[in-house]
Amino acid sequence: MKVTQLTVFLENRSGRLAEVADLLGREGINIRGFSTTEAAEYGIVRLIVAEPERARQILHDGGFTTHFSHVICVKVPDQPGGLAEVLDQLAEAGVSIDYLYSISFWNICFAVKDVDRAVELLKDRVTLLSDEEVRAL
């Protein structure tokens, strides 16, 4: 049960990630999950999308470098210790994890350089969750 993951390589500059989301959204491609990592000059976006082949072509046509790989997606029990239970099973089976990310994203956490400035800029534009609200989810 492999899941196709679409990796997109981005220049590390403002707006580039938004371009990916805009391109896919305009073409009706639903993003089911994602992960981002960054380095000094570039970023990597890993996507689980409804139509991987079509999404890859759209991004390629938009000037993005992409790559397909496979991941496994595991349903984690929604209870305290649920993730540990799954991780223990993987460890016992001798499966080494390179990275992981959630594909359930009604609420998304973003790492930004200036959190206070971001809060000030966004407070009237999007629904920001408090620490207490996130912990109560």
Image (cartoon, helix red, strand yellow):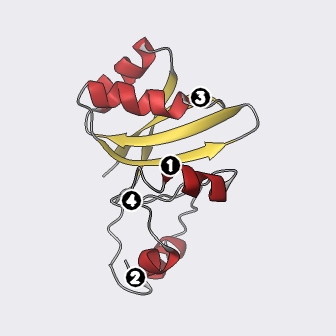
Residue 56 picture location, percent across and down: 38, 24
- Image position, residue 118 (x, y; %): 59, 52
Amino acid under disc 1: Ser
Crowdedness near tag 3: few (<14), some (14–19) or many (≥20) residues, C-alpha within 10 Å: some
Q: Looking at the image, is mark 3 or mark 4 earlier in the sequence?
A: 3
Residue for badge 3: 10
- Which badge, 2 or 3, comes first in the chain's sequence? 3
Residue mark closest to the camera, 2 vs 3: 2
Q: Residues within 10 Å of mark 4 (few under 14, many from 20)?
A: few
- What residue would you read off at disc 2? 136
**Count of labels shown?**
4
Q: Is residue 47 left or right of residue 36?
A: left
Q: Which mark is residue 127?
A: 4
Mark 1 touching mark 4, by CB under 8 A?
A: no
Q: Which mark is residue 35?
A: 1
Q: CA distance from mark 1 to mark 2?
A: 23 Å
Q: Nearer the viewer, mark 4 or mark 2?
A: 4
Single out the mark in the foreground, 1 or 4: 4
Which quadrant, please, contains the C terminus? bottom left
Separation of marks 2 and 3 at Cα, in angstroms: 34 Å
Placement of 125 over or under 94, stated as above or below: above
Question: Mark 1 or 2, which is nearer the eye?
Answer: 2
User: The disc labelled 2 sits on which kind of residue?
Assistant: Ala
The residue under label 3 is which amino acid type?
Leu
Q: What is the secondary structure assignment of the residue under circle 4?
A: loop
Position above or below: 114 against 16: below
Q: Which amino acid is tagged 4?
A: Thr
The residue carrying pointer 2 sits among few (fewer than 14), some (14 to 19) or many (20 or more) residues within 10 Å by Cα, namely few
Q: Secondary structure at mark 1?
A: strand
Q: Choose the circle earlier in sequence order: 1 or 4.
A: 1
- Marked residue nearer the N-terminal end (1 or 2): 1
Task: Please tell me whether mark 2 sits on a helix, a strand or a loop.
Answer: helix
